[in-house]
Amino acid sequence: MEYILINQKGDDSFDEEFETKEDALKALDAEWYHMNEEDQKNCTSMYVLKSVQPNEEEEFHYDGDIIKAYKYDGHDYTDLENCPEFMRNDKDVVLDAVRYRADSIQFASEELRNDKDVVLEAVNRDGLVLEILSKEFQNDKDVILEAIKNDIEALEFASKEIKADKEVMLKAVKYEGYALKYASDELKNDREVVLAAVENSRWALEYASDELKNDREFLLKAIRDNIEVLEFANEEIKNDREFLLEAVRQTGLSLEYASDELKNDREVVLAAVKNDGWALNYASYECKTDREVVFAAVKNEGRALQFASDE
């Protein structure tokens, strides 16, 4: 048994033989290190193979510990694109390749491009590689869930069926609330899914259905965890006096998202500052000059006095 160092430079190719794996690896590293810049640019690839001679016929085999390749940019990775065909059909070779560079999967054999182990390894390394996978894998729950752990934007390349799958989308919005933008219209109107999304990110409500953006009960529940979701509520609800009264009694700082008219509504503002004195900051000028309102705010939070009018 011996080890062969294959070195390809442009149109030239040569190899060296070594008795041990360690010697072959050292030579591989040294060969690249001592190349001048011009030679590195002309280097197509370098890798090591294990040579065996059963029945006196020489065969080359991949050794999982020692395959290496280099490209002209100076970075080393398993260069699947320039590997011989038999290596692109070797599962160990391909797995090594996608672990270093996920999009190497496109250069694997057809069989291995459709191997779920290889696909899972690739999306684990880079979720966005989902874009170049087959429709079968773009519709595979296991693959999608692995991909979105790496990059939630991988959902863009998932199938319509996946985007309409409540189980998958619930997990997705718990990773990143704004994943709601990729959900089906039906799920954008699903209270459980949208609530999970807005609990994770206020921005998520932007992608919810208009129906939920105008749903009093839903919004009151949502602001318990994140009052900033009101920023994306419909203007109609921000003008709804009954809703705003309930909202500020629950969370005084909800006043920030009220319409100008309601920020000047004495009853609404008074309810807000009694819940949280800091809400005085969002009241109208007229309310900031109202002694009873200011007193209620300061009683709740002494530092709220800074928001009162000097008059």
Image (tube, rainbow, N blue to C red):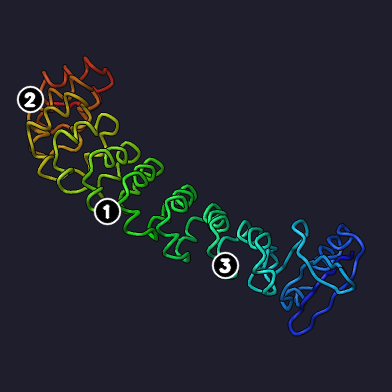
Residue 242 lies, in percent from the top left, at 7, 31
Q: What residue would you read off at disc 2?
A: 267
Circle 3 residue? 111
Give the residue at mark 1: 184
Decide if residue 20 is on the left or right side of residue 270: right
Tell me the amino acid under the disc marked 2. Answer: Glu
Q: Residues within 10 Å of mark 3 (few under 14, many from 20)?
A: few
Residue 118 is situated, as x and y percent measured from the top left of the image, at 57, 58
Q: How many marks?
A: 3
Name which residue lies at 63% across and 72% down. 81
Closer-to-camera residue (66/116): 116
Is 6 placed above or below 203 here? below
| Gap in angstroms between the C-alphas marked 2 and 1 | 41 Å
As displayed, is residue 273 above or below residue 45?
Answer: above
Residue 181, image x and y in percent? Answer: 30, 52
Three-letter amino acid code of the residue under disc 1: Ser
Q: CA distance from mark 3 to mark 2?
A: 70 Å
> Could you tell whether 68 is left or right of 51 in the image?
left
